[in-house]
Amino acid sequence: MSKGTQTREAILATSADLASRIGLQALTIGNLATEVDMSKSGLFAHFGSKEALQVETLNAAAERFVDRVVRPALKAPRGEPRIRAVFEEWLNWGRKHSMKGCLFLQSTAEFDDQPGAIRDVLEHQQRAWMKMVSGAVDRAKTEGHFRDDVNSELFAFEFYALLMGYQHAHRMMRDPNAETFLRAAFDRLLASCH
Amino acid sequence: MSKGTQTREAILATSADLASRIGLQALTIGNLATEVDMSKSGLFAHFGSKEALQVETLNAAAERFVDRVVRPALKAPRGEPRIRAVFEEWLNWGRKHSMKGCLFLQSTAEFDDQPGAIRDVLEHQQRAWMKMVSGAVDRAKTEGHFRDDVNSELFAFEFYALLMGYQHAHRMMRDPNAETFLRAAFDRLLASCH
DNA sequence: GCGTGGTACGAACGATCGTGCTATTTTCCT
DNA sequence: AGGAAAATAGCACGATCGTTCGTACCACGC
């Protein structure tokens, strides 16, 4: 790996980190440069514009998300087990970034009202994620794990809602029961599909 | 009402409006002053600091929220009807601010990682809201609408999660089924309490 | 091992940030 | 109606924003 792409990846990792704490808008080239111990201009040269930096931060983070959440879950058998695996991997991933919050949820809230390249990337990512979940539900139906009349898109909606609710309870309210509640609600959701 | 508090309220209304679009951090005294057609310094004099402006924006918005969502719902009979009323009023309130997003959900995502006065205010508001919901559930239990073993805090968790999920589906994904999904999930939640 | 191109830096730009000060205007009470 | 008080504006400040430019360095293929 050339020196260029090497520092580039280091920048993007730190950027995702910082952005998930302070937000993708509040991220500035100056404080990011300080964080990675580079000059503003040296860092800037890698991306050409702040918006490009933001977009690439999201894309790089999404790649890592797929690597650490989606891909591992694919090792579970199709259908319901895989859905449970996605759920567990997501939780694990959240624990790793222990207290740093989810960049996607944060950015989504920030940019849902601001048309532009960033919003477009986010919407595309979210759509892929939702499709992945509803696809897994469809498979669970054909495998016979779920009833035939289960609405897979509705499932994805509720599933995503629970994850958002968990983040809120965990990070904003510091509710020690957050995970317990999440699991209870998730179990109830699964049970409703049998 | 004196001139001062009058412009002050106008500022706070516009501020909540603007903040719910671009975020509470991205809100600047300059663009807010332009929006309300005042000078930067004239506006600034009302609050003394940006943080105070942000805090008061949240508090003023919370007052309006109580006026337009919580208070009207109190006219419904205690218990389950009131819970349904809160749900409907929340949806109505969202429709009024048609496409402007929820300031509280947005700000919560922005500040859940940033200790300070703003986070404190948000946490306090969220806690009051959750307590209001779980309190209504408790009442529904004593009224006999809900089973005795319903966990009111878990209900509040799921309820809030659904509202967040709806906002996400509606605003980020522009999903035309968002409301349908929300209602279906809410009905399922209620049904699980009978 | 040398040259070339990719990589990083320092300085500077105009703009805007939040925040003071000092006038000036407007409101409100007697 | 007049005068104190409140409200608003004007101007300036240091800091920082994203971005540009010229230049130095360092890596790496020949």
Image (cartoon, coloured by chain):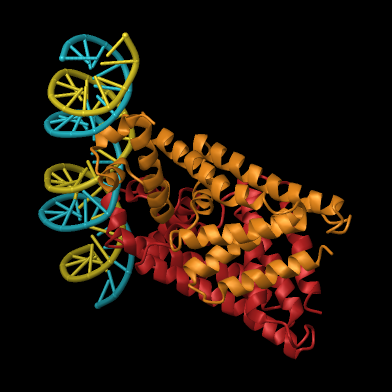
Chain colours: A orange, B red, C cyan, D yellow
Please state if A162 lies on the left or on the right of A10 as rendered: right
**In the image, residue B76 lies at what x, y percent?**
73, 78
**In the image, residue B163 lies at what x, y percent?**
64, 62
The residue under the point 32% across, 31% down is A3
The residue under the point 51% across, 45% down is A64
Image height check: is B18 above or below A179? above
Please state if B84 lies on the left or on the right of B50 as rendered: right
In front: B136, or D30? D30
Q: Quadrant of residue B147?
A: bottom right
Please state if B121 lies on the left or on the right of A117 as rendered: left
The residue under the point 58% across, 66% down is A166
**In the image, residue B78 lies at what x, y percent?**
72, 83
Q: Residue furthest right?
A: A148
Image height check: is A118 above or below B96? above
In front: B190, or B50? B190
Q: Quadrant of residue D1?
A: bottom left
- Please indicate, yes or no, whether residue B163 appears anywhere in the rendered image: no
**In the image, residue A117 lies at what x, y percent?**
51, 34
The residue under the point 37% across, 51% down is A18
Please state if A24 lies on the left or on the right of B167 as rendered: left
- Please indicate, yes or no, whether residue B84 appears anywhere in the rendered image: yes
